[in-house]
C-alpha cells in the first residue's frame, strides 16, 4: 500500500495571493475615472469608449464644459472657452444694468441635464485630494477643444495624483498632459501639402506646433464604444428585429455637412440615384439620419425612397437601432463628413462604402486617403454589387489606445484595478 504523501506546509515567505492593493499600496492602483466632456456626443463617445476598453463600465463621473448659447453667443463659439465665458458675463452685466434686472448665470444645462456636473478643475482636484488616501489616484479622460483648459489645470494642480489623457489634438504644449490620443490626420497640417494651404501667420493658431513624441498616441480614426463584445450583445438584443430581414442588408448612415465636408441637396440626390442603382443586389436597405442632417436632405431621401418596399427609414424615435445596424448589417454606406460614424462601421470588418469623400478638404482628405490605402473603405458610386462580401482587418484604434494607457501607467508604477 503506497504511503499518502501530504503536501509541504506553505513557506512563511511564499506568496499567498495577497490582493494587489495590499502588495503595492492603494496609491499605485487606479480604480476610478472622470470624463471631461464638451457636451458633443462624438466627443463623449471618444472618452467613454476608451474607458470601456480599459475595463470601466459605469464607475466614472461625467463633467461637462458648457458654453453660453443663443443670440450673439452663437457667433462666439470660435473663442477660447474662458474668454467666451468672460465676454458673456460682461454682456450679462450690461443687459442687467440696462434692464435693471438680475443678470443670467454664465452657464446652464440645456435639455434637463442638471444631473451632469459642471466641469471645474478645482472641484475635481479637491475631490481627488480628499479621497486619495482611501481611493488612490484618478484617471482623467477629456476630449474636445473646450476641455483642454480644464484637463490641463487638473494636471497642473495635482500632477502626482492624476493621470490625464487628452483626446483630440490640443495643438500646442502637449506636455500639459500625461498622454494625448489623436487621429493621424490631425498632423496633416505639418505635411508640405498642408503647409501650402495655411498662411504662414496663421500656422501657429490652427496647426500642431511640433511633431508627435512618445506620449502621443496616433490612431487612424476616432475612438468609440464598438468592439466584438458590444456587437455580439447587440446582435442578441436586436435579433427579433433583424433575424428575418431580407439579405443582404445595406445600412446607410447619413451625417451632415461641415466646413471641411460641405454638401447639400445635391449630395442627397446623388445618394438617392446610387441607392436606386444598387437596390437590385440588396435584400433590404435601412437608412438613419444624425442630429446634424439638414431637413432638406432628409426630406429628399424620405420622398424618393420612403415608399420603396425594400427601404426602411428610421424616424428618429426610440429605441435607436444604431447598435443593431452595426451588428446585423452586411454592408454600409456612410457619408464622408463623420469620422466617428465611419470609424464605427470600419470596426466591424464589413464592407464600408463612402459617399461624398471627393467633396472633403483639408485634413479630411488625408483621413479618407488613409482608409482607402488600407483597403478599409471604397467610394460609393452606385455600380456596386452589395452581395459581394469583401473584408479587411477591423480597425481597433480604441483597443490599441487602451493598451498604450496601460503601458504608460505601468511605466509610472501604477496599474488599473477595476
Image (cartoon, rainbow, N blue to C red):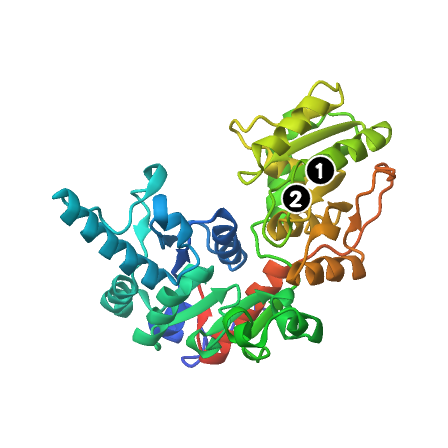
**Residue 79 vs residue 411, the one in the foreground:** 79
User: Looking at the rendering, which quadrant does residue 252 occupy?
Assistant: top right
Residue 418 seen by the camera: no
The answer to whether residue 26 is left or right of residue 357 is left
**Residue 244 vs residue 352, the one in the foreground:** 352
Q: Residues within 10 Å of mark 2 (few under 14, many from 20)?
A: some
x and y, in percent, of residue 231 in the image: 63, 43
Residue plotted at (63% across, 47% down): 341
The answer to whether residue 294 is left or right of residue 175 is right
Q: Dot 1 corresponds to which residue?
A: 266
Q: Dot 2 corresponds to which residue?
A: 263
x and y, in percent, of residue 88 in the image: 28, 54
x and y, in percent, of residue 203 in the image: 55, 74
Decide: marks 1, 2 in contact (CB < 8 A)? yes
> How many numbered discs, if any?
2
x and y, in percent, of residue 68 in the image: 33, 50
Which type of secondary structure does the marked residue at label 2 adopt? loop
Residue plotted at (53% across, 68% down): 206
Q: Please, is residue 193 above or below residue 114 in the view?
A: below
Q: Residues within 10 Å of mark 1 (few under 14, many from 20)?
A: few
Residue plotted at (36% across, 60% down): 81
Q: Please, is residue 308 above or below residue 22 in the view?
A: above
Which type of secondary structure does the marked residue at label 1 adopt? helix
Q: CA distance from mark 1 to mark 2?
A: 7 Å
Amino acid at each position: 500500500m503506497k504511503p499518502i504523501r501530504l503536501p509541504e506546509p506553505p513557506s512563511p515567505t511564499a506568496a499567498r495571493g495577497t490582493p494587489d492593493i495590499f502588495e503595492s499600496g492603494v496609491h499605485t492602483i487606479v480604480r476610478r475615472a472622470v470624463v471631461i466632456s464638451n457636451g458633443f456626443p462624438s466627443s463623449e463617445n471618444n472618452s467613454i469608449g476608451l474607458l470601456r476598453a480599459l475595463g470601466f463600465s459605469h464607475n466614472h463621473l461625467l463633467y461637462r464644459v458648457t458654453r453660453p448659447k443663443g443670440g450673439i453667443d452663437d457667433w462666439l463659439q470660435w473663442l477660447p472657452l474662458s474668454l467666451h465665458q468672460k465676454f458673456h458675463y460682461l454682456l450679462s452685466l450690461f443687459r442687467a444694468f440696462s434692464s435693471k434686472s438680475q443678470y443670467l448665470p454664465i452657464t446652464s444645462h440645456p435639455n434637463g441635464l442638471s444631473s451632469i456636473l459642471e466641469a471645474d478643475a478645482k472641484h475635481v482636484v479637491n475631490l481627488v485630494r480628499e479621497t486619495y488616501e482611501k481611493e488612490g489616484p484618478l484617471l482623467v479622460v477629456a476630449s474636445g477643444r473646450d476641455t483642454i483648459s480644464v484637463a490641463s489645470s487638473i494636471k497642473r494642480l495635482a500632477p502626482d495624483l492624476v493621470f490625464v489623457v487628452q483626446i483630440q489634438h490640443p495643438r500646442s504644449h502637449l506636455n500639459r498632459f500625461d498622454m494625448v490620443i489623436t487621429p493621424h490626420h490631425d498632423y496633416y497640417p505639418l505635411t508640405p501639402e498642408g503647409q501650402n494651404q495655411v498662411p504662414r501667420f496663421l500656422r501657429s493658431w490652427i496647426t500642431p506646433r511640433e511633431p508627435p513624441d512618445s506620449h502621443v498616441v496616433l490612431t487612424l480614426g476616432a475612438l468609440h464604444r464598438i468592439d466584438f463584445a458590444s456587437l455580439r450583445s447587440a446582435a442578441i438584443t436586436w435579433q427579433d428585429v433583424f433575424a428575418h430581414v431580407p439579405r443582404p442588408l445595406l445600412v446607410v448612415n447619413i451625417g451632415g455637412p461641415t466646413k471641411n465636408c460641405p454638401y447639400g441637396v445635391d449630395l442627397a440626390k446623388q445618394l438617392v440615384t446610387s441607392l436606386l442603382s444598387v437596390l437590385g443586389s440588396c435584400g433590404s436597405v435601412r437608412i438613419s439620419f444624425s442630429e446634424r442632417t439638414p431637413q432638406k436632405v432628409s426630406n429628399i431621401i424620405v420622398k424618393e425612397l420612403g415608399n420603396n418596399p425594400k427601404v426602411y427609414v428610421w424616424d428618429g424615435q426610440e429605441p435607436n437601432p444604431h447598435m443593431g445596424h452595426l451588428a446585423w448589417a452586411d454592408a454600409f454606406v456612410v457619408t464622408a463628413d463623420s469620422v466617428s460614424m465611419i470609424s464605427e462601421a470600419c470596426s466591424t470588418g464589413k464592407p464600408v462604402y463612402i459617399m461624398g469623400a471627393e467633396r472633403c478638404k483639408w485634413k479630411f482628405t488625408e483621413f479618407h486617403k488613409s482608409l482607402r490605402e488600407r483597403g478599409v473603405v471604397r467610394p460609393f458610386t452606385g455600380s456596386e454589387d452589395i452581395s459581394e462580401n469583401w473584408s479587411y482587418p477591423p480597425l481597433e484604434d480604441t483597443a490599441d489606445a487602451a493598451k498604450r494607457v496601460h503601458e504608460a501607467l505601468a511605466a509610472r508604477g501604477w496599474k488599473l484595478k477595476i
